[in-house]
Amino acid sequence: MAATSEVPSTIPSDQGSALAGPGARRMAPEERIAALMDGLHSILEQAVESPSHWQVLLDASANLWRYSGGNVALLMMQMAQRGTDEPTLVAGYKEWERHGRTVLRGEHALWVIAPRTARVQQMLLPDGTRQRIPVGDKLPPGAVDEGKKTLITGWRGQAVFDVSQTQGAPLLVPRPADGSSMDAPQLWESLTAVARAHGFSIHVTDAQYGLTSGFTDFAGRQVQVGGWLNAEERIAVLAHELGHVLLHGPDDTVGKLYGSSVDHRGLAEVEAESVAYTVLKAHGIDRGPQSASYLSGWADAVIDAEYSAAGEGSFRKQPSSRVDIAKSVLGRVTAASKQVLEVTEPPGLGGKVPAAEAAPRVQNQETYVGLKQPGGPSNGLEIAGP
C-alpha cells in the first residue's frame, strides 16, 4: 500500500514534509527516498563529529526503540525542523483513527523509510540449485516446494504523525521510573534471560580480567560480572556485555569489515556501551556520566575504523566512509537494543502505539470534564497527546 493512501486529502502531507517545506511541489516516491537519505547522511555526519550528537541519537532511540535507528534520526530531524518537541508516539493516519484520535487539521506528515515487499515461492531444482518464482506460478517438473518467502524489493516513504499532531481519546502510557525506584532484581533477571536465550550463562564473581568489571567469554559461552559492584552497576555491566554477546561473536562478519569485533576493541566497546546506554535509558536509568568515557571516543573510533577498513584493500565489501560506518553502527546498536528491550519490556510503548484492541486508553473522554485528570507517580502512567 502506498504511503499516501493512509493520509486524507484534507491533510496535505506531501506538501508538508519537513524535507520539502509547506507549499512545495508534490514529490515523486524516488525523490522522497533520496531526500530522506540525504537528511540521514547529514545527521550521521554531525554524529561522527560530535559524541554529544551521537548521545542525542541514543536518547531518542531509547524512547522510540521499536523503530530503526535511521528512522529515529529522520523523525527527530523533521520534528526539530518544525520547532516542536521530539517525537514520542508515532503512527499512520488510520492507526490513530483506530485509537480514537484524529490528526489535527493542517498538520503535515512526518516521513519514515519503509520496505517494499513481495511474496515469492522458493523451490529446489533437481540439479540442487534454488530458484524463486512469483507466488501462484507452476513449479517445473522435479522441483521441490520449499515454501513462500517475503523479500524486500525496494524502499518507500511512509507518512506518519506524532501523537502531538493528533487529538481525541487520551492514551495512558506507562512512564519509566527513575533509577532509584526501578525494580533492579526484575531487570537483572530479564537481562540474564536474554543471555541464556543466546546460550550464555551469567557468573557474578570477584575474579578480574584486566581489571575490568565485566567480561564475555565466547569460547566458554559465559558472561562474568564483578561481584564487588552494587545492584545498579551490575545491571549496567551486564547490559554492556549483552552488547558484546549480540554483536561481537566470532561469526560477526559485518563488524569485522570495519574494525568492530572481538579483535578490534575500539569501536566494539562503543557499540556495546551504546547498547547498554539505550537499554538502561529506556528503563529510566541515565548512565550519561558513567558512559562518557566510552562515548567520548566515538568519533575517533569511527575515524580509526575508516582508516583500518581502507587499509584492508578494495577487494572486500566494506563501508566506504565514516558516515557509512556510523550508519552501520547505528543500525547494529538499535537492532541489538530492540532484541534486549523486547524481553525486558520497559515502561512506555517504544514509539509505536499497540494494537488498537489492546490499547490502554480512556474509553470515555467525558469522564474528565470538569475534573482533575489522573496522573502522577502513583500509578506510573502519563497521558499522551492534547
Image: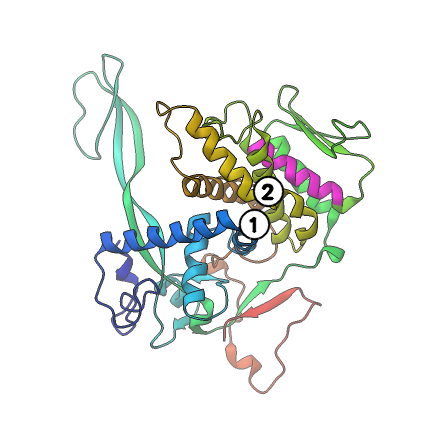
Q: How many marks?
A: 2
Please say if 317 is above or below 357.
above
Q: Is residue 84 visible?
A: yes
10 Å crowding of disc 2: few (<14), some (14-19), many (20+): some
The image position of residue 241, as x and y in percent, is 65, 35
In this orientation, does residue 68 appear? Answer: no
Residue 199, x across and y down, in percent:
61, 26
Residue picked out by circle 2: 297
The crowd level at tag 1 (other Cα within 10 Å; few <14, some 14-19, many 20+) is some
Asked whether 225 or 365 is in front, the reply is 225
Taking the image as shown, residue 284 lies to the left or right of residue 383, namely: right
Measured as percent of width and height from the top left, residue 283 is found at 64, 53
Q: Amino acid at mark 2?
A: Gly
The residue tagged 1 is 51
Identified by mark 1, the residue type is Pro
Q: Residue at x 39, y 72 (%)?
A: 102
Are dots 1 and 2 in contact, CB under 8 Å?
yes
Question: From which residue to which does the magenta span run?
Answer: 233-246
Q: CA distance from mark 1 to mark 2?
A: 8 Å
What is the secondary structure assignment of the residue under circle 1?
Answer: helix
